[in-house]
Every structure is written in C-alpha cells, then in structure tokens.
C-alpha cells in the first residue's frame, strides 16, 4: 500500500500585506493544515525608508525629524534616544528642568503606545468598544503633548542640548486631569477585558515564548518582561533622571499573550505615577545647553519685539556698518564661532530678525551645523516596545558617519514564527497584536 | 380569491416591514455602537432641497441630523459599485450564493405570528403569513438551508480565506443548530404544539393568576441557552468566526457591491429572525400582559374595555417592541464582547450548550410527567 497517496496536502496562505491585522506592511507566508499553522515565514521591509542611510546624508540636526517616524506612536522617546546619543558625543549634559520635561514626555508617550497596542489587539479580537475607550484616553494625552510640542505625531520636540520649548502653564492641570481620566478608562477597560472569559481564553497560553528563547533572540521590553525577566533600561542602566523616581517593573510568569497584556496594563499605571512624581518635583531653570555645555538663558529664546515688549526698542538707533565690525559686532559673535548652541533659534527669531535667520541657516546648512568630536556612542532608552538603541558614529564632520537604530520590535518579529507555529490561524492575531509591531521602527 | 388577496397583502406587509427593519438595523447598529463608544455616529447623509423648498428641508432636518438616510446612502453605494467576480471563481455559484442566503433568511418570516387576529370587512384574518402546523421545524429547516449560501460563497470565490470562512460557517451551523433545536424542545413539550400561533396563544395563561406564563418563566435555562445559541446563528460577534474580519476577513471576501450587501443584509435579517423567535417562543409573542380580546383585565379586578381593533394594534405593537428589545440586546452584546476562537466556539457548542440543553429537555420531561396538568 502506498502511503504517499493518503498524504494530506497543506494549504499555503499569504497573510498580508493587504490584511486587516497585518497593518499593511507585513507578510506572513503560512503553511496551514486546516486551521493549524504548520510553518510560517515572516516577510518584512514593506515600509523601508532608508532611515539609516538618509541620516548619513544629512546633518546631525536633520536626523531628528526622521526619528519621529520610527515608532510613530511614541515619537518623543525616539527623539530623546537620538538626542541623548548626540549629547554624549559632545559630552554635554542637559539642564535639570529639561531632563524632567523629557521624562514626563517619554512616559506620556509610553502610555499612549501601550494604550494603542492593547486597544488595537482588543479590537482585532472583536472588542471594538474597548479600543475606542483607549483611544479616547490616548487623545487626552495627545492633547497634552500637542500643547507642549505643537504637533501630535511628527513633533521633533527634543533636540540635542535640550527641548524646543517650555511647558505651558496650562499643561500641568491638563495632564493631571488626563491622568485621572486615563486611570478611569483603564479601570473600565480592565473590567471589560481582564476577566472577560472570551478575552482570557483567546490570550492565555497563546504565543508562549520561553525566557531562554526571548533572551537568545534579543527581545526586550514588555515582551521580555512577560517571561519573568525584569530587564528595563530605565532601571538596569538608568538614563536621564529615571533613578530619582519610584516605580516598579511589572513582570509576568509564563510569557504568553495574557501576561504581556497584564504587563502593559501595569506599566501604564507605573508610567502615570512617574509623570505625577515628575510634575510635583520639576525644578525651574533653563531648558537648553549649547554644545559646550553652557546653559542658554530662556530669555534668549524669545524675540522681545515679537512678544510685544517693544519698550526701549522703538527709539533704538542702530549703527549700520557693512563689515559687521561696529555696533553690530555683538550679533556677529552670536552668529559665528563662539555661539555653540545645538538647538535651532526660536522661530520668532528665525522669521523676525536677520541674526536668528543666519543662525538657523548656519545650523541647518551642511558644513556649518554642529560638529561633534570624532567618536562613537551607543545610547539606549526604554521605548514602548523595549530597548530602543541609537548607535551614532561621528568622524568629526558635520554629518554622522553612521546612525544605527536598534528597533525593539525587530527581534520580536524574528521570533514570531516560534510563537505562531503549531497554533491556530486565529491565534496569530492576538500574538501579532501583542508584538505591537510598528512598521516605521521595524523597517526603518 | 379573497383568501389569496389577504395572504398576498399579509406577505407584502411582512416583507416590507422586515426589509425596512433590516435596513434600519444598519442605522441602529451605527448609532448604538456610537452611543456605547462615546461617539456621535453616522450623520453625514443629508437630503437637502433648494431654498424654495425650505419647509421640506425643515421637515427633513431631524432625519438628517439623526443620520436616518444612511441606509439609503448605503443602498446607493452598494448598487453602484462594481460587481466583481474573481476570474478563477465559479460565476454561477458566486452569484447564486448571496441569493440563497437572502432567500432562506427571508422565507422564515412567513411562519412568525406577529399578531392574534384582526377583523377587516367581515373577514377574520390570522396575523401570520403561513399558518403551518410544524412552523418551528419549518423555520429551523430554512435557517439551516441558509448556510448553503455561505458555504457556496466560500467555495465559489476560489480564495483560501473564503474557503476557511465557509468551512467555519458550516461547522458552526452544525453545532449550534442542534443546540438551538434542543433548547426550544422544552417549550414545545410544555405547550404541546409546533404551531407558533398556538404556542403564543398558550402563553396567555397566568401563573397564580398574575404572573404571565411566558416561555422564559417556565423555561429560564432554555431561554438563556436559546439566546446564546441564537446569536451564533446570526454569525455576529462573539460568534463571528465565519466572518472574523481581522482573522480571515470572511467568506464574503471576494464579494463587492450589492452581492456583498445581500450577505450583510442576511446577517441583519437573521438577527431579526432570532429576535422574533425569541419573542414568539419565550416572550409571549404578541401577548400583552392582562390584555384579552375584550380589553385589559387586571388581576386586582380592574378592567378596561377596548375596541377589538385597538387590541389587535396593541398586540402587534407589543410584538414589534419585543423584537426591537431583542435586537437592541443582541447589538449591545455584539459591541461589548470579543470574538471566540473557532475551536473554542465549537467546544462551547458541543461541550456546554448541547448537554445543558439536553439536560433541560430531560428535566422538563420529568417535571411534566410528575406534575399533573
């Protein structure tokens, strides 16, 4: 008898890139036996934008807007990681107030990242209402971010040497209210999902990854912590002022989707606590330092005339001389060598007076911008999905020699077949949802 | 001859109402989900006339604001879209499938009694399109035929996702048809009929003289099981494995235009069907508590005489309100719960619902044997 004749054929299924759960940028080539996944292959690269190569073509400052597009759900953390890497190249340290602002903004971004992740995976499981509740909470946080940065997605707020602008006065009450609302919404979603039998059945015991595998693949973030390893960049190699805050790193036990869900839910609460602590203890002071570490007074960032403070300016006589030698000498100094600020001048200056415009021009034009000393730096920050690392190599010129990003979801995507093989087709959805794959960061 | 005319009028009325209710269901779905999710909901399909017809605009304004014209906009969109048949699919079956689905979803309504009787011009009309003795069996028969449309849709599309959807639909239908059939057996045993009109009339009695003896009073477990299994019939969340839009997109992945619209419509029709069945079997159908053919007769002795026509209208209204209540309930469930996984769904059907329903039948039979009539 020929057994080969009774062999069952498996079915090849292309899941994505045009698939509702694949974000349009991932293709899973699946070999299915009925509904069981026998084998799978992950194909990435649909959102490749040559971030790293583009960074080599542009000055240090022009990379910042590119970093917004990495993990576009929490762009502030990307800004921060890159800026800190460049700051370390210069060997400068931002001001206290700036560090606190950075921490507040990063943690708000982390919460919005987790909200999106949990909400979207709940939606993909059919719980559409929970998704919209979470997006409502995210909207409140985004409003706060918008208040400070002026943008919601492509913010470019954190720059080497500081942050673009100070927190407005109405920020703190808004965020305190947003935190209260977010907690309420999280509690509501917790009631809707955490002990919902259908939801638990869909997540528990699905997409398990062992500690060893997770470490071997280089997985970090909530994904690693769900396996029981309490690795968090904020605790293990504290950066900025994270060591001043009191927060816990939630860990799971089994490394399945449900643990990842619980980890993320708890991390949001911890992040909100960090924000509250930072808001209560934020010091005053300047926001920026120049590339030699000198603080730039906040007043220098504002054009007085633009702010309506024209007293004393109206009657001012200006000595004009063609060589910039006489009365305009002081501006000349500000434009040329001694001025070492790495941040662009306030937009009021750029558009309002020639010195600001020239300074802006000097900073953004190739060969005129900031030039860190030769060297290399790896700076990791805790992103929404795990360790987000920036490796920046400087050869002493105005452009980075190399900018390498360690995206946290890349190793997770590499390990994805491990988790989905042998499971059901329907289990891919929650597992993939818990990866929180962000195309911009994965494909760069 | 008059008999035929009456039947035709009845059928047309039922068809008209069912179609409109299904179309309004899209509106209900949008608005109810919006309400649950802190949104406003669809309100952009406006009909606005030129200024010289301003009074008409004023009249239409509330409809516009409420978004009540969205079903019409949907219909226009569906009909004007390209009707795409996959080149390697089976053209005939691909077209037949949505027709089958829609047909079998519609014909079931013929056996639903939506009122007692009404007297028009000397004719006593039974408010039911077809007074079938085995109406319950008939409804389950056509409901399970509906799955052919789904399976054929999956098969004829020549798309792996659609095939998976069709397979899921057929196995789901198999598991839940049996459970749903068993849950209503208790009702059939207690009231002793398969004729739905008889069943509803039998629910007009009172326990202790004041508690309406409706189906859910005598069969509470049967009622809950029927609701749970009934939602599975409608293929909506949490039982939407055949559709599962984020997993396999669904058996209708290769459908567009009005053919897709027909499947969509079928879902709503099935929801209304289950709501009508739940009303008829467990919520006393068109019965209004303490309302007899002569008017209200309250258990504490008060009476309130009503004209026969008013009574009939009240009964029809009562039926419609109950159906709407169930539609609302199903939609609230749909927008609250996540989706079962395919195997969990089958397990729930076979391991929990089926034995429970069987036990319910057994216990009902025991009680009926022990308690004298």
Image (tube, coloured by chain):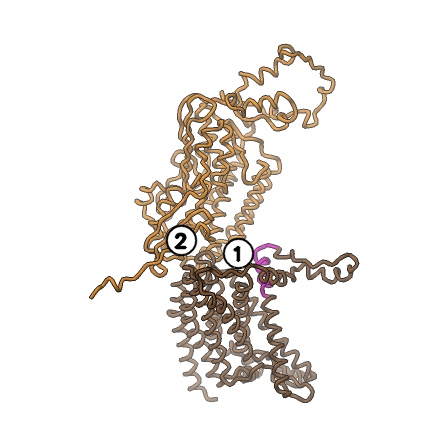
Q: Nearer the viewer, residue A6 or B82?
A: B82
Subunit that carries the residue with mark 1: A
First to last magenta residue range: B25-39
Residue A147 versus residue B27 in the image, above or below? above
Q: Nearer the viewer, residue A180 or A356?
A: A356
| Residue B42, position as x, y percentages in the image | 62, 57
Tag 2, which secondary structure? strand
The structure residue drawn at horizontal position 56% and vertical position 29%, both measured from the top left corner, is A284
Q: Colour of chain B?
A: brown
Residue indicated by mark 1: A129
Relative placement, left or right, of B13 versus A240 is right
| Residue A121, position as x, y percentages in the image | 46, 52
The image quadrant that residue A232 belongs to is top left
Magenta highlight on residue A231: no
- Residue A253 visible in the snapshot: no
Tag 1, which secondary structure? helix
Of labels 1 and 2, the one closer to you: 2
The image quadrant that residue A400 belongs to is top left
Residue indicated by mark 2: A14
Does label 1 or label 2 sit earlier along the sequence?
2
Residue B42 versus residue B317 in the image, above or below? above
Subunit that carries the residue with mark 2: A
Q: Nearer the viewer, residue B289 or A377?
A: A377
The structure residue drawn at horizontal position 65% and vertical position 56%, both measured from the top left corner, is B44
User: Which residue occupies the extreme top position in the image?
Assistant: A326
Residue B183 versus residue B80 in the image, above or below? below
> Which quadrant would the N terminus of chain B be assigned to in this image?
bottom right
């Amino acid at each position: 008898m020929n057994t080969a004749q009774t062999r069952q054929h498996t079915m090849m299924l292309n899941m994505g890139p045009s698939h509702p759960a694949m974000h349009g940028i991932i293709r899973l080539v699946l070999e299915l036996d009925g509904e069981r996944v026998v084998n799978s292959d992950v194909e990435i690269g649909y959102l490749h934008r040559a971030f790293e190569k583009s960074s080599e073509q542009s000055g240090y400052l022009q990379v910042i807007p590119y970093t917004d597009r990495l993990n576009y759900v929490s762009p502030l953390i990307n800004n921060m990681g890159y800026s800190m890497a460049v700051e370390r190249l210069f060997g400068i340290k931002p001001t206290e107030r700036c560090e606190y602002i950075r921490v507040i903004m990063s943690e708000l971004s982390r919460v919005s990242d987790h909200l999106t992740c949990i909400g979207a995976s709940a939606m993909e499981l059919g719980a559409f209402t929970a998704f919209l509740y979470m997006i409502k909470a995210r909207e409140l946080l985004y409003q706060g971010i918008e208040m400070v940065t002026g943008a919601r997605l492509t913010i470019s707020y954190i720059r080497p040497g500081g942050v673009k602008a100070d927190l407005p006065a109405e920020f703190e009450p808004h965020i305190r209210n947003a935190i209260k609302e977010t907690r309420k919404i999280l509690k509501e979603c917790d009631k809707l999902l955490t002990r919902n039998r259908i939801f638990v059945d869909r997540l528990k015991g699905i997409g398990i990854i062992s500690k060893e595998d997770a470490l071997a693949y280089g997985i970090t973030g909530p994904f690693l912590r769900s396996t029981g390893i309490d690795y968090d960049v904020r605790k293990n190699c504290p950066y900025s002022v994270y060591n001043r805050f009191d927060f816990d790193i939630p860990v799971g036990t089994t490394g399945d989707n449900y643990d990842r869900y619980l980890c993320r839910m708890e991390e949001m609460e911890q992040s909100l606590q960090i924000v509250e602590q930072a808001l209560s203890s934020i010091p005053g002071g300047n926001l920026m330092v120049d590339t030699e570490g000198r603080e730039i007074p906040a007043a220098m960032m504002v054009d007085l005339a633009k702010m309506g403070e024209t007293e004393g300016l109206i009657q001012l006589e200006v000595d004009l001389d063609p060589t910039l030698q006489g009365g305009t000498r002081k501006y000349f100094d500000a434009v040329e060598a001694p001025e070492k600020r790495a941040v662009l001048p306030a937009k009021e200056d750029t558009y309002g007076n020639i010195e600001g415009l020239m300074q802006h021009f000097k900073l953004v034009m190739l060969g005129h911008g900031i030039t860190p000393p030769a060297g290399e730096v790896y700076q990791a920050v805790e992103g929404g999905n795990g360790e987000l690392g920036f490796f920046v190599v400087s050869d002493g010129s105005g452009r980075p020699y190399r900018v390498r990003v360690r995206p946290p979801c890349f190793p997770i995507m590499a390990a994805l077949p491990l988790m989905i093989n042998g499971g059901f087709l329907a289990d891919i959805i929650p597992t993939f949802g818990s990866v929180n794959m962000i195309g911009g960061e994965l494909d760069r | 001859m008059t008999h035929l005319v009456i039947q035709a009028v009845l059928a047309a009325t039922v068809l008209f109402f069912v179609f409109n209710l299904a179309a309004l269901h899209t509106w209900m779905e949008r608005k109810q989900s919006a309400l649950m999710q802190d949104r406003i909901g669809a309100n952009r399909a406006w009909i606005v006339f030129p200024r010289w017809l301003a009074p008409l605009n004023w009249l239409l304004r509330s409809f516009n604001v409420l978004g009540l014209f969205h079903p019409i906009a949907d219909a226009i969109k569906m009909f004007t879209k390209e009707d795409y048949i996959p080149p390697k699919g089976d053209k005939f079956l691909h077209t037949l499938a949505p027709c089958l689905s829609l047909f079998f979803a519609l014909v079931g309504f013929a056996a639903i009694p939506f009122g007692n009787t009404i007297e028009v011009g000397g004719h006593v009309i039974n408010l039911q399109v077809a007074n079938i003795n085995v109406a319950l069996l008939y409804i389950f028969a056509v409901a399970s035929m509906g799955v052919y449309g789904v399976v054929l849709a999956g098969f004829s599309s020549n798309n792996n996702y659609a095939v998976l959807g069709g397979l899921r639909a057929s196995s789901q239908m198999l598991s839940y048809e049996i459970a749903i059939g068993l849950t209503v057996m208790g009702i059939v045993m207690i009231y002793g009929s398969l004729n739905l009109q008889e069943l509803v009339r039998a629910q007009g009695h009172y326990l202790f003289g004041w508690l309406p003896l409706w189906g859910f009073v005598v069969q509470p477990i049967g009622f809950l099981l029927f609701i749970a299994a009934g939602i599975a019939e409608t293929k909506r969340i949490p039982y939407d494995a055949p559709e599962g839009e984020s997993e396999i997109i669904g058996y209708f992945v290769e459908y567009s235009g009005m053919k897709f619209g027909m499947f969509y419509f079928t879902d709503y029709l099935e929801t209304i069907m289950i709501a009508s069945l739940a009303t008829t079997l467990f919520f006393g159908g068109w019965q209004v508590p303490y309302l007899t053919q002569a008017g209200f007769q309250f258990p504490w002795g008060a009476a309130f005489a009503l004209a026969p026509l008013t009574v009939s209208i009240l009964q029809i209204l009562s039926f419609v309100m109950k159906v709407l209540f169930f539609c609302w309930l199903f939609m609230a469930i749909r927008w609250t719960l996540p989706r079962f996984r395919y195997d969990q769904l089958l397990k729930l059907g076979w391991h929990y619902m089926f034995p429970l329903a069987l036990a319910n039948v057994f216990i009902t039979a025991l009680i009926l044997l022990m308690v004298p009539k």
